[in-house]
Image (tube, rainbow, N blue to C red):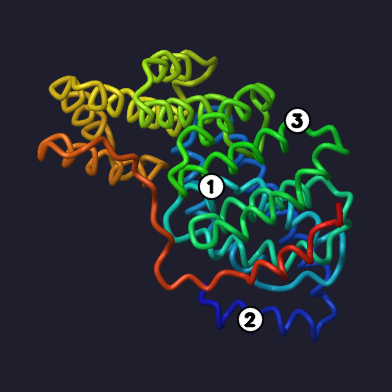
């Protein structure tokens, strides 16, 4: 159904005083789809999670486009946006849309709701490539709330985003410390955020960039985490770290074989689009004799992000 047809249908429902019932039904559907997608992602069925979001994408977009009129609806929709964190954070072209949803929903939700805290670190993650300073401000606002709530999962995710910010500014030592903290703090199988294995794999990447021998051990530790075989994201980052470490240590042939083999394993159904350009950059560096560079995704072109001050105003005061 086209957007025009949906808007026309919504107007007819309002005229018939049936809009509230239809809105309740659509909010519940949106929440259930997001919960199912997050459960698929967290349980190792990441390709299925991505496919579910693609299949339901239009329904989700329609519900999230319309500003909810009731606070309980806003809370449910914010929870749905947080549950779809992987769609906004991992997929190309979705970060700006996720930020727009967070900006619309955060101000109308009760500040003590757990989804508001999760929305804070997620907003920082989505802001980081385009505006690292603003992302840091969001994290500084969110961190005290996570401490007061005793939310180890949120504290671990905040540390992970700090690690990403350190990578963006080229401070590999700081990145390694933050990713280590994230891996140590995030509870096993905590939903709605990167897994411990992902943080360990990111730590291995930072260590590989530093040229430390610990990178291989950390990457293999990531690959040995319970349930990691279904965590495509963690596996790809860890294997990228191993190839990067080989290149950094002068084992060019081993690095090239590993990177090519990992790249060949990718297909269009894989849920981690940044893996291919990272591996291609590494292969190019190896083949041309260039230095070992860590791939950092660029900010999306033509992004129209929510101004950071407006996002900060949506979060509870520390």
Q: Position of residue 4 (x, y in %)?
A: 56, 83
Disc on the earlier residue, 3 or 2: 2
Q: CA distance from mark 3 to mark 2?
A: 42 Å
Q: Could you tell me how many numbered marks the image carries?
A: 3
**Residue 262 bears which disc, if any?**
none
**Residue 7 bears which disc, if any?**
2
Residue holding disc 3: 152
Q: Circle 2 — which element?
A: helix
Q: Position of residue 250 (x, y in %)?
A: 19, 22
**Front residue of this view, candidates 43 and 90:** 90
Disc on the earlier residue, 1 or 2: 2
Residue holding disc 1: 165
In front of the other: label 3 or label 1? 1
**Front residue of this view, candidates 250 and 82:** 250
Q: Quadrant of residue 275?
A: top left
Residue at 22% x, 42% y is 280
Q: Is residue 56 left or right of residue 192?
A: left
Mark 1 Cα within 10 Å, few/some/many (few <14, many 20+)?
Answer: many
Q: Quadrant of residue 217?
A: top left
Q: Circle 1 — which element?
A: helix
């Amino acid at each position: 159904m086209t957007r025009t047809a949906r808007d026309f249908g919504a107007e007819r429902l309002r005229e018939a005083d049936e809009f509230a019932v239809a809105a309740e039904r659509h909010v519940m559907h949106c929440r259930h789809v997001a919960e199912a997608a997050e459960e698929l992602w967290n349980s190792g069925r990441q390709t299925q999670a991505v496919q579910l979001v693609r299949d339901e994408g239009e329904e989700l977009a329609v519900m999230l486009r319309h500003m909810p009129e009731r606070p309980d609806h806003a809370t449910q929709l914010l929870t749905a946006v947080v549950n779809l964190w992987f769609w906004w954070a991992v997929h190309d072209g979705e970060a700006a849309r996720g930020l727009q949803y967070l900006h619309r929903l955060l101000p109308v939700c009760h500040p003590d709701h757990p989804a508001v805290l999760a929305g804070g670190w997620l907003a920082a993650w989505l802001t980081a490539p385009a505006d690292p300073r603003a992302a840091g401000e969001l994290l500084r606002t969110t961190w005290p709330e996570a401490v007061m709530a005793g939310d180890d999962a949120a504290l671990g995710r905040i540390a992970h985003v700090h690690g990403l910010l350190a990578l963006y500014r080229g401070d590999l030592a700081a990145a390694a410390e933050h990713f280590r903290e994230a891996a140590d703090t995030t509870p096993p199988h905590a939903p709605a955020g990167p897994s411990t294995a992902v943080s360990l794999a990111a730590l291995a990447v930072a260590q590989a960039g530093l040229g430390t021998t610990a990178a291989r051990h950390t990457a293999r530790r990531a690959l040995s985490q319970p349930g990691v075989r279904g965590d495509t994201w963690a596996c790809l980052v860890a294997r990228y770290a191993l190839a990067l470490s080989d290149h950094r240590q002068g084992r060019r042939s081993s690095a090239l074989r590993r990177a090519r083999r990992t790249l060949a394993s990718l297909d269009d159904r894989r849920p981690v689009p940044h893996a291919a350009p990272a591996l291609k950059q590494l292969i190019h560096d190896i083949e041309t004799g260039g230095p070992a560079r860590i791939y950092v995704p660029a900010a999306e072109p033509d992004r129209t992000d929510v101004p950071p001050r407006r996002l900060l105003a949506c979060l509870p005061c520390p």
